[in-house]
């Protein structure tokens, strides 16, 4: 009877050991799973914090929606006192076909083809005018540029304390190589003013506000720009996104 009791005791002891071992393995597996999950979350957080200022500005203006855009249309208008002008564009963003329209002319061309003098003249205006409309995206699209940043600077028009990111274009390529643009933005990456400096000179050629925010097709546009004296107004009408 003693031998049987000892055998039963050994069986129970071994069973308890097996149960304990299984429990420890299960706990270890769950710990590994939790660790892997936490590492994934930490990695995701790290990737979010690694966005550059330019990327954060572009994201605020809806660059994530750009891949679904097939056509952008707009009219570019300038008013100086009693004088002014306007010109319109229809841009197929997938094929790079452009239609340029004024009261006198309609010019069609593809930006990937060799252009004649009339088409080149139209394209120079397209590049300028679309830059005013899409410059938050150009911060991350354009190549051959240099970006720099300053925190808490005095904005030239409002005199508010804002942040500044500057993009400087390379000395070669494009219609106006070497130019610089200073973007003055808030802590939520909204642009309030900007300055254009021809040839990266110290003195700005043009300084305007960024007014009247409109969201169209998931993209955010500032459709009105004014100088400090309100004598110059640049504005967009007929903005359409497909």
Image (cartoon, helix red, strand yellow):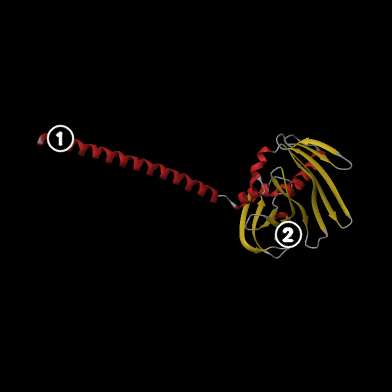
- Say whether residue 46 is left or right of residue 195: left
Q: Residues within 10 Å of mark 1 (few under 14, many from 20)?
A: few
Q: For residue 23, which quarter of the picture?
A: top left
Q: Position of residue 94 (x, y in %)?
A: 70, 35
* Mark 2–mark 1 distance (CA, rounded to whole Å): 95 Å
Quadrant for the N terminus in the image: top left
Q: Position of residue 117 (x, y in %)?
A: 81, 39
Q: For residue 195, which quarter of the picture?
A: bottom right
Q: Is residue 143 visible?
A: no
Residue at the spot of label 1: 7
Residue at position x 61%, y 49% from top? 55
Q: Position of residue 47 (x, y in %)?
A: 52, 47
Residue at the spot of label 2: 204
Pick whichever, 97 or 1, lies toward us: 1
Q: Does 108 appear above or below 153?
A: above
Pick whichever, 66 or 139, lies toward us: 66
Query: Tag 1's secondary structure?
Result: helix
Q: Does 33 appear above or below 84?
A: above
Quadrant for the C terminus in the image: top right
Mark 2 and mark 1 lie on one chain; the one further toward the N terminus is 1
- Say whether residue 31 is left or right of residue 52: left
Q: Is residue 12 visible?
A: yes
Residue at position x 64%, y 51% from top? 57
Q: Position of residue 172 (x, y in %)?
A: 68, 47
């Amino acid at each position: 009877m003693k031998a049987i009791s000892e055998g039963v005791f050994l069986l129970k002891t071994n069973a308890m050991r097996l149960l304990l071992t299984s429990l420890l393995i299960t706990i270890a597996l769950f710990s590994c799973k939790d660790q892997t999950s936490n590492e994934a979350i930490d990695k995701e957080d790290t990737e979010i914090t690694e966005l550059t200022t330019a990327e954060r500005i572009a994201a605020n203006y809806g660059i994530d929606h750009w891949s679904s855009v097939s056509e952008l249309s707009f009219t570019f208008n300038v008013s100086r006192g009693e004088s002014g002008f306007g010109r319109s564009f229809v841009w197929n963003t997938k094929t790079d076909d452009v239609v340029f329209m004024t009261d006198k002319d309609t010019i069609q061309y593809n930006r990937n083809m060799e252009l004649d003098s009339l088409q080149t003249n139209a394209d120079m205006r397209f590049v300028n005018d679309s830059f005013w409309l899409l410059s938050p995206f150009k911060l991350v699209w354009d190549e051959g540029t240099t970006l720099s940043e300053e925190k808490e600077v005095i904005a030239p028009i409002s005199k508010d304390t804002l942040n500044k990111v500057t993009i400087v274009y390379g000395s070669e390529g494009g219609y106006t190589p070497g130019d610089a643009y200073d973007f003055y933005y808030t802590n939520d990456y909204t642009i309030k003013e900007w300055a254009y400096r021809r040839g990266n000179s110290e003195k700005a050629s043009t300084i305007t506000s960024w007014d009247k925010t409109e969201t169209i097709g998931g993209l955010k546009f500032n459709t009105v720009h004014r100088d400090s004296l309100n004598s110059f107004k640049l504005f967009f009408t007929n903005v359409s996104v497909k």
